[in-house]
Image (spheres, coloured by chain):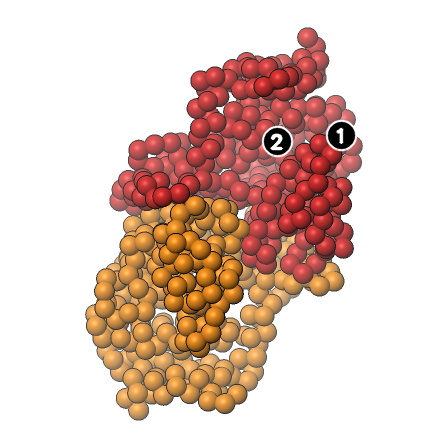
Chain colours: A red, B orange
Amino acid sequence: MADTITLSIAEAEALLKAAFTNIGVPDATAASVARALAAAEAEGQVGHGFSRLTDYAAQVQSGKINAAVEPVLTRPAPAAIYVDAGLGFAYPAMEAALDAGISLAQEMGIALMAIGNSHHCGALSIQVERMANAGLIGLMVANAPKAIAPWGAREPVFGTNPIAFASPRADGPPLVIDLSLSKVARGKVMAAKKAGTDIPPNWALDVDGNPTTDPDAALTGTMVPIGEAKGTALALMVELLAAALTGSAFSREAGSFFHADGPAPRVGQTLIAIDPGHTGAYGARVSELLSQISAMDGARLPGERRQKAIAAAARDGIQVPAAFISQANTLAGE
Amino acid sequence: MADTITLSIAEAEALLKAAFTNIGVPDATAASVARALAAAEAEGQVGHGFSRLTDYAAQVQSGKINAAVEPVLTRPAPAAIYVDAGLGFAYPAMEAALDAGISLAQEMGIALMAIGNSHHCGALSIQVERMANAGLIGLMVANAPKAIAPWGAREPVFGTNPIAFASPRADGPPLVIDLSLSKVARGKVMAAKKAGTDIPPNWALDVDGNPTTDPDAALTGTMVPIGEAKGTALALMVELLAAALTGSAFSREAGSFFHADGPAPRVGQTLIAIDPGHTGAYGARVSELLSQISAMDGARLPGERRQKAIAAAARDGIQVPAAFISQANTLAGE
């Protein structure tokens, strides 16, 4: 590919970390953010990778992201953890929640991790997979700045409010599901805008609630949810679990994940870890079902493309647009 | 309405209970099943009400439903409850799970209730609402006999695998969401078959994976999922949570909910209760968001029709087809 530079995952992490530390982000936080962006890049979720660097950096520099804050963890009930991200990055808060929550779920059978006053959480797949790698079923929801209208309305209220799930299995890597509740990711509309192309008429609605092929009209309007009224019901469910339960801003109140100015997003993330250990042969049963599906003519399992991307990245490195590498080098002072 | 008989909810419950006790169902179990069917009827979910009576009764009489069994509750971990429904009715098992699980969630912050070796669970709304009435956020998933194909495949693997959610709010009854992952309920196809009418082409696929308007072809084929690949990913998530985690049969292995013969369904249900008490003003925040949505032009909130049906049923009673009343009277020996 022209205009890309190939880096190993370790090189990508090191470069991203250097960029953040050089603008004053504390070492441990810079490492956490760099790890998450490089991991997203490795699994092919480029919208949650290097492309976020300059926006994150500008928000650190404007103070919209409080990069110096340490997440504060409390345990309001025996099986529940609350993490106040303090308007800092989401990644160190999620790491703190999972460091405590994984062992808590192993002890209690189930654990709740509610993260409030947070920011963009990137690829949820990475967080739920961490639970599954520890032998737990992982569930996660997150809210995000407004993009989807309630059913019948035209004004955006819900974010694209993703749901993610991971499960261990006996004979392979965890099954990982990670999906937003809009028909297509908002990033695809932004990409079309940048490329100057139209979008298909079933992706988004304009401010009057009519289908539009114009990316600008789509970005000021709303994203079409999956499953019509059912999708907006799921988006409301995520909104209450991710925002209300964590004491965070609703999607309609949340500041942008991109702009350096304006209010902080102050969104929330809720994770649930479940220990299937009491179930006889859980992992073997999961493997059995997934194998049966894989053997079906034409069937596709969620996460197959992701697994291939991760394997390819580990083997061959990741291809990063040269412009992003140049931005990272500039921030890193090199 | 012609050919319907109006009953109060209490009368409906008493009639259903008499029908079950007269065919040998123990008193407490008969009461539990009658309560659930009458409550489903009251909220307008007629597919989970009186229409189930003769199929349930035939399965009791054939021994496919072990009506005499008592659900066995264990607590494999401090915040986790497992209920073995013992191939009996689902309703007493869910009641036992919630009797223990609601107080456990209030103590632990979150509680898992996994119900295995179970049967048709009716309207999930009733179970999640019970958690919300106790001040908890309620989540529930269930698997069901196969109806939906994995993405790209033609053979059914997943049930319509519903997801339900309920949340308390400060100034009104709980918000209740209850949705299956098929575009339309399978019951609508069965109703079209009974009525001898075609179905719209976007409801179901025939055995070759092609859209069909023929109810028979639909019933031997698969139901179209919501949200395309995303809907089938959610169906897989529900399958693992409801069946694998509870040690139950996968949807593709599950016996029919309707026929008197054949293997027992042996499906599972998983419920999660979360105490939002640690969150400042949770109920008030929920009310705030729901009020904002309600005030929007054209917006509809999930559960509005259900609330109206419940209020009307409490005020005016429920209208039950005379044929169902006659069947109930016959079973009750009257």
Q: Position of residue A121 (x, y in %)?
A: 59, 34
As helix, strand or loop, the secondary structure at mark 2 comes to helix
What is the total number of numbered labels drawn onto the structure image?
2
Quadrant in which the C terminus of chain A appears: top right
For label 2, the residue is: A47
Residue A182 as seen in the image, left or right of residue A110: right
Q: Residues within 10 Å of mark 1 (few under 14, many from 20)?
A: many
* Up/down of A174 relative to B121, above or below: above
- The answer for which chain carries disc 1 is A
Q: Position of residue A274 (x, y in %)?
A: 40, 43
Tell me the residue at 42%/53% (across/down).
B209
Q: Position of residue A289 (x, y in %)?
A: 32, 44
- The answer for which chain carries disc 2 is A
Q: Is residue B99 visible?
A: no
Residue A221 as seen in the image, left or right of residue A279: right
| Residue reaching furthest to the top | A334
